[in-house]
Amino acid sequence: MPADYILSKPMHSFKALSGQFNQRFDQRVFPDKPSGLYDPAQYILGLGGKRIRPVLCLMGNELFDEIREDAFDVAVAVELFHNFTLIHDDIMDEAPLRRGEPTVHYKYGPHSALLAGDVMLVQAYEYLNRIKASYIHRILQVFSRTAREVCEGQQLDMDYAALALSAVDMGDYRHMIALKTSVLLAASLQMGGILGGGSEGNLDHLYAFGKNLGIAFQIQDDYLDAFGDPEKFGKQPGGDILVNKKTFLLLKAWEMGSPAVRKAILELMESETPEKVMRMLAIYHDCQVDRWAREEKMSYVYKANEHLEKITVLSTRKKELSELVDILLNRES
């Protein structure tokens, strides 16, 4: 099929590509035995999720060319790696629930959970080894760099959790979020773009688009946890406040607060009063942190869209990525 014909066609929507990916991914990925190793790995995959990262890989490919079979293998590798990080994060956070169900380490024990995570990472590289030799070196380079950065981000997250609130710098925190959350979104798009034959300049803009989108996504998550509608968000707001999690909102309230406000924040973090969430939210409102979060999110959306605009393909090809930004960042759950 001629390239100019392909590039004049509209891309598939996120929903359509999500359906294509899930149709392939919802089949069992791992062998049956030994069940003590593979059942826990299969269990977390069965919990579902939005599958944002693998679908971004497919969209990155289709931005420049027809979707190649290799893109599905890379997309599976990305989703396996993402779930590997979730298993290990849950162990480190001692989290009891994931997507409303018992976490892998709660259901199967920490030893089996560790091994299940490890084998998911190995399986991710098995899928990468299936792609054409002409792409494999570049894809492995991006994937391995990203995997290392995500681990760096998780370590920084644990480091910051152990520090006093006053010792965590907002700029350092943004860097941590970029590593822990954004780089995998960006790399998913970039790897798809590599398979689609995107130029270096276009790939750089595509990566920057994903990275800024990832930070905006995290700010939205923090905002919804504090101010989301319980009926739409699916849980009572303030979960991060209850566990004293350092978020964009908490760090901004500290940064903007007077000595009296900072004293009140520290007292609330030490307390277990039933009014803890309500009182912290009142501080957020007084400091206008809710307004700041909305504006900060939109500043990253603007940066993301600037990079998307600079990608040299027809605007019609970029329409679905542009609409995805609206879907992800205007959500209420």
Image: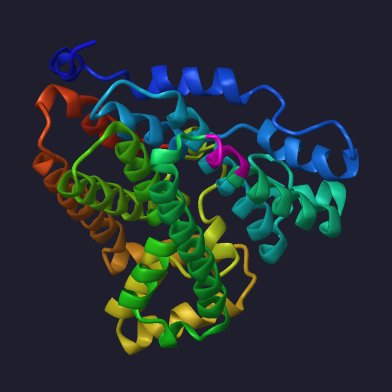
Q: Residue furthest front?
A: 133
Residue 29 seen in render: yes
Residue 222 seen in render: no
Question: Residue at coordinates 18% horizontally, 42% vertically from top-left?
Answer: 199
Give how far across and how far down residue 264 sits, in percent: 45, 80
- Nearer to the camera, 145 or 237: 145
> Would you place residue 273 above or below residue 305 in this image?
below
The residue range painted magenta reads 126-130
> Magenta region, mostly helix, strand or loop?
helix
Q: Is residue 297 magenta?
A: no
> Would you place residue 67 above or below residue 118 in this image?
above
Asked whether, in this view, residue 101 is left or right of residue 289, the answer is: right
Question: Residue at coordinates 39% horizontally, 41% vertically from top-left?
Answer: 135
Give how far across and how far down residue 23 sits, in percent: 57, 17
Quarter of the image for residue 15 reads top left
- Nearer to the camera, 111 or 58: 58
